[in-house]
Amino acid sequence: MTLINPQPSFHALIPAAGSGSRMGSELPKQYIDLLGRPVIRHTLDALLAVGALSRVWVVLAPDDAHWTNYQWPSDPRITVLRCGGATRAESVANALQDVAKQTDPATWMLVHDAARACVSPQLVARMIEELSDDPVGGLLAVPVADTLKRAGDDGRVAQTIPRAGLWQAQTPQMFRLGMLREALAAHPDVTDEAGAIEACGLSPRLIASDATNFKVTFPDDLAMAARLLSSAAELQK
Ligand code: CTP
Ligand code: MG
């Protein structure tokens, strides 16, 4: 008897175990208020709006005292893991160990920063469509628009970097669970999932995104995120 190989599933994994040091707030930035809800609630809602995603894993710091202070959507796809580590890569790697205990290694994992609260569900759906047959996987990214300068120690320009061919990496970053787990275990010092895959000699595909999927990092970013989310909500009406 031949077993029919089922179509692979798509899961989101949201690292949310950071402290948000650049935000300079006592409250970790994923919980800061944005239009009356914590930042991560917007991120979660956007991913839950993607029908192809059958699970959404949220990765918290083991000592997170905030998550339980809020009401969350009662969507059975959400699972909270309290296994965040000292770095983002460690949080993701720890979570993948837990996920792997109950998930097929061929499952596509879309790792998405909790702090990218303005991500568009349509763009995530398009990414899934474009990458589901890809042998490696890929990431959302934006071509660099500005000329880049490398600064010297004296605060003066030491070098101009040609921007041709340069992209800014965003998330989601989408790779198969088995491949991503091995890549992060072998290369724990990377700053994103694609970096670990590249270090294994593979080339992730770039999927064109736009600046609205920026990462809420500094205090001024909150007003920008609020404007983008309000206008997206207006357009929905
Ligand atoms: N993150 C994580 N575990 C860490 C560090 C970061 O899960 N040890 C998560 C953050 O919660 C965030 C995402 O990774 O959703 C992207 O990281 P970043 O924007 O750098 O967030 P922070 O590390 O919290 O902020 P900062 O670098 O300013 O301290
Ligand atoms: Mg950080």
Image: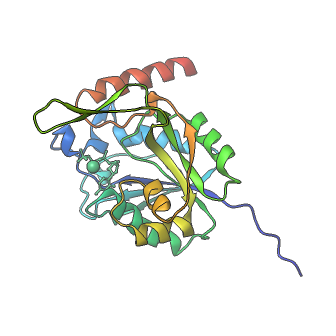
Q: Nearer the viewer, residue 109 or 155?
A: 155
List the single residue furthest toward the right.
Answer: 1
Q: Which quarter shows the C terminus?
A: top right
List the single residue furthest toward the front.
Answer: 159
Q: In this rendering, would 111 be left or right of 3?
A: left
The answer to whether residue 82 is visible is no
Residue 61, image x and y in percent? Answer: 29, 60
Count of labels in the image: 0
Q: In this rendering, would 22 be left or right of 13?
A: left
- Residue at position x 63%, y 41% from top? 125
Q: Which quarter shows the N terminus?
A: bottom right
- Residue at position x 33%, y 46% from top? 70
Colouring chosen for the image of the structure:
rainbow
Residue 90, image x and y in percent? Answer: 34, 64
Q: In this rendering, would 186 be left or right of 157?
A: right
Residue 137, image x and y in percent? Answer: 59, 54
Residue 168, image quadrant: top left
- Residue at position x 31%, y 44% from top? 30
Residue 59, image x and y in percent? Answer: 38, 58
Residue 215, image quadrant: top left
The answer to whether residue 186 is visible is yes
List the single residue furthest toward the left.
Answer: 154
- Residue at position x 53%, y 34% from top? 209
Q: Nearer the viewer, residue 21 or 135?
A: 135
Residue 211, image quadrant: top left
